[in-house]
Every structure is written in C-alpha cells, then in structure tokens.
Image (tube, rainbow, N blue to C red):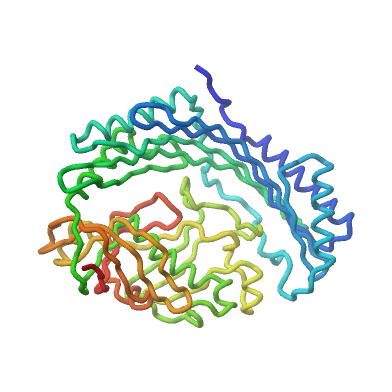
C-alpha cells in the first residue's frame, strides 16, 4: 500500500516560503517600490470519488501561488505567478511595478497600519495531517456509499461518495516588517443518493468536514444521514401561497447570516450598495440576539492568527443585544469610510451566533404551524434593498409535528424584516463552516406556491 508523506506542510515549508517572501520584498524595493506586500501559498491533497460501488476518480493535487502588490506612493500594482524560481519572482515584481507606475493615485491605497500588525501568534491547532493512501480513501468512500445504499430499499441510485484530505501552508509579508505564516488541514467525507417510490424520485446528501480526520463523523453515519434525508423527501408536494412562520435549519441558516455580513462589508458600504448603510449602533436584530467573531477557536474552520493584511485578529462582538457593534472592514474600505480596519481582509473568522437554550424539536413546538427549510436554490438577494426571494424545499409542520415534505416553493421577504423577526435560535449549532449557528425561527415570511 502506497502512503503519502506524513506532511509536506512543516516548519521547514513555512521557512522556505518566508525566505521567498523576504526576497520578493527586497526585489520590490530594488525596483523602486515605496512599499510592498506578498502572499504565498502551497497546498496538496487527495480526493477519491466512488459511485455505485465503482471508483470514479482519484485526484492528487499540488498547487502553489504567489501574489504581490507594490506601491509607488499612492499608486498600486499587482501581479501573480505559480513559479517560485528567482527569475519568475523577479519578473513578477517587474510586472507589478510596471502596472503601478501607470495607475492613478488613490489616497486610500496602501498597507495596513504598522501598529496593527500581529505581534504574537496563538496556537490554533489547525494542522492535522491525514496520511491517507488512495486505497484507504477508496475503502472509506465505499463504506460510506454502501451504508447509504443499504439503508433503505427505496435508495435506488447514487451520485457517489467522496473522501478528501487537504493540507496547505500560507505566508504573508509586507514592508512594515511583518512576516508570518501558518499551516492548516481540511478533511471531508460526503455522500449523495437518490430515493424512489411511486411518488417519484428525490435526491439528498450529507457531509462531514473537519481540520482533524478524527473529528469526522463515521463513514457509515454520513451515508445513513444522506439516505435518511433522501427518503424523508419522498412524496413531496407543493403548498398554496400563504404567509407563515419559517424555520431555517442550521445548515441553511448560515446563508441568512452570510447576507448580513455581506451587507455590512466595507466594499458595499463605501459604494453605498447596501440596505444597512449607516446601521452602526442601530438595532437590526431582536433583543438578546448576539453574534461574536471568534478567530482563535482551536481547530475551527475559520480560525486565523492574522488577516490577509497581517492585522492581528481578535475576538469581538459584531452584534450585541440586537445592535450592530461594528462593520466588516479591510484597510482600504476602512479608509474610504474614515474608520479603522477590523482585521477582516479576506473575510470573517468564525462568526458564532449565540443560541438559546432550546432544542430543534422544541423550536418546532414553538412554531406550531409553519415551514421548515432544508434546502435553498437560486440567489434572489438584492443587497441594495434587502429584498429576498429563493427557491426552497423542506417540510410542512402542524401542531409542532412534521406532516409532509414540500418542494417547488419560493420563500420571500425583506432581510431587514426577517432579521427583526427572528424569534429563537436552536442549540443544534452546525460547526461545519465559518458561520456557526443553530436553526433559526422567523416570525413570518411569504411562501409562494400553487
């Protein structure tokens, strides 16, 4: 059995990337740049897919990339390469400098302020190598799919099961004397199957993802969940158009919070293309609703010691008691708005929505009659107005009990009204992403059907 190396993303790898970054900055200075910044990454991984008991794909990946931005005063130029040779690096610097010399000045351009750079790096425990041979990955994928196909005779087809592992190293450096880097891993198991009976066919899936392979759900359980979800959707029907309470399950509720983050993102704010303009310090969510950014959670998928500009990340509130405490800013958007970066260059890091002490089943009882959304389709969101309309499927609930699955419906509203109408957050928090939330109960939405 052929094994991959224990890890190619070691301290030695990071030191090599740091050496390249240092040389890039020196070369940029030699070519006349007043300031420069560089991000370098390498990654490797394995992905195996099986379908109907046969191996479909085995894919090994090894990628690397280098991105450079130089400044000539307030003029900016960027270039990138996947070639780390000395000649290629020099050519990349030359290309970035040539671009910068011919661009217009932008008073907001430049590196993040030097005093905001990360000085210490907490141990976030992000790297957990999984020395998985292709033969072992195939066995796990087959175990996952066989569990799904054998779970119920109504599972008649499969879209396959996938097993993947990924490791990467990232280094960022700038001429404010910042040089930092870290290595991380991400592993996953997924499965999608099709159920069939006299009512027709339905497809559903399940997946597990984690930094540490030991934290993944057991392969048979991933398959079983995929099968259970597909079978539960058999007999789906439409609803007549109505208004009703709605529960977004934990995995779909992440999207609601993503739209919020997008609306308070600096680039949308300074362009005045957000329905949450001038919302700082204003109550958007109900009393008791809290969102906190926790970038230093160990092994979490969104953890990072610094952002893409080298600014130190830190835990702080985004929403407290329903009131927006800060925007999501990088240095450029912060300067545009006359504010300071919030260490969110590249995105947010582990947004945690504080749950209520209530289970999903209790949430159903509280809703009494309404819709549970388990999947969303389409992207009918207008960030300027907050208008929201998406295709959906899920389950209709009466007297706190699931009555039947539904499909081919649309849920609609306005995000401002939806956020204000949040009644409860269940404690079934989904940690498989950068936004951690439980299921969300919203007072009222329009459901368009027949």
Q: Residue 95: which quarter of the image?
A: bottom right
x 34%, y 55%: residue: 251
Give above or below for 327 relative to 82.
below
**Left or right: where does residue 271 sit relative to residue 321?**
right
Above or below — where is 274 with respect to 23?
A: below
Residue 220, percent across and down? 29, 33
In the depicted view, which residue is nearer to us: 321 or 162? 162
Left/right of residue 170 with respect to residue 74 in the rendered view? left
Residue furthest to the left: 399
Q: Is residue 229 visible?
A: no
Please, is residue 450 above or below residue 173 in the view?
below
Q: Position of residue 392 (x, y in %)?
A: 30, 61
Q: Residue at x 70, y 67 (%)?
A: 113
For the C terminus, the image quarter is: bottom left
Q: Which x, y percent locates residue 86?
A: 83, 41
Point out the residue furthest to the top here: 1
């Amino acid at each position: 059995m052929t094994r991959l190396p224990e890890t190619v993303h070691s301290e030695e790898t990071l030191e090599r990337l740091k050496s390249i970054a240092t040389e890039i900055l020196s070369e940029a200075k030699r070519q006349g740049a007043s300031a420069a910044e560089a991000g370098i990454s390498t990654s490797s991984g394995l992905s195996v897919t099986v379908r109907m008991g046969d191996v479909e794909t085995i894919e090994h990946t090894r990628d690397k990339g280098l991105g450079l931005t130089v400044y000539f005063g307030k003029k900016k130029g960027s270039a990138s390469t996947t070639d780390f040779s000395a000649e290629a690096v020099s050519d990349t610097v030359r290309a970035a400098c040539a671009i910068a010399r011919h661009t217009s000045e932008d008073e907001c351009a430049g590196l993040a302020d030097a005093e905001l750079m990360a000085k210490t790096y907490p141990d976030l425990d992000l790297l957990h190598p999984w020395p998985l041979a292709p033969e072992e990955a195939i066995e796990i994928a087959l175990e996952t799919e066989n569990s799904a196909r054998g779970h119920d005779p109504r599972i008649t087809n499969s879209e396959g099961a996938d097993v993947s592992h990924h490791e990467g190293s990232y280094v960022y450096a700038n001429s404010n004397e910042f040089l930092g880097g870290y290595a991380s891993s991400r592993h996953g198991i997924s499965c999608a199957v099709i159920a069939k009976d006299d009512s027709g066919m339905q497809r559903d899936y399940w997946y597990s993802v984690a930094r540490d392979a030991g934290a993944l759900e057991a392969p048979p359980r991933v398959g079983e969940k995929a099968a259970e979800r597909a079978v539960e959707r058999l007999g789906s029907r439409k609803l007549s158009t109505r208004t009703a309470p709605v529960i977004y399950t934990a995995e779909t509720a992440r999207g609601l919070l993503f739209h919020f983050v997008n609306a308070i993102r600096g680039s949308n704010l300074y362009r005045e293309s957000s329905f949450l303009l001038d919302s700082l310090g204003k109550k958007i969510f109900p009393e008791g609703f809290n969102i906190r950014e926790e970038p230093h959670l160990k092994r979490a998928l969104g953890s990072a010691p610094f952002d893409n500009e080298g600014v130190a990340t830190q835990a702080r509130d985004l929403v407290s008691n329903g009131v927006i405490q800060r925007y999501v800013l990088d240095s450029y958007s912060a300067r545009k708005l006359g504010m300071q970066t919030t260490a969110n260059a590249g995105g947010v890091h582990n947004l945690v929505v504080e749950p209520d002490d209530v289970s999903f089943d209790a949430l159903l009882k509280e809703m009494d009659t309404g819709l549970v959304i388990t999947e969303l389709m389409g992207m009918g969101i207008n960030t300027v107005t907050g208008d929201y309309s998406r295709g959906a499927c899920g389950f209709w609930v009466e007297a706190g009990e699931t009555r039947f699955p539904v499909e081919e419906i649309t849920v609609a509203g306005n995000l401002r009204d939806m956020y204000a109408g949040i009644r409860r957050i269940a404690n079934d928090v989904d940690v498989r992403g950068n936004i951690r939330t439980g299921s969300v109960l919203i007072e009222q939405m329009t459901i368009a059907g027949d």
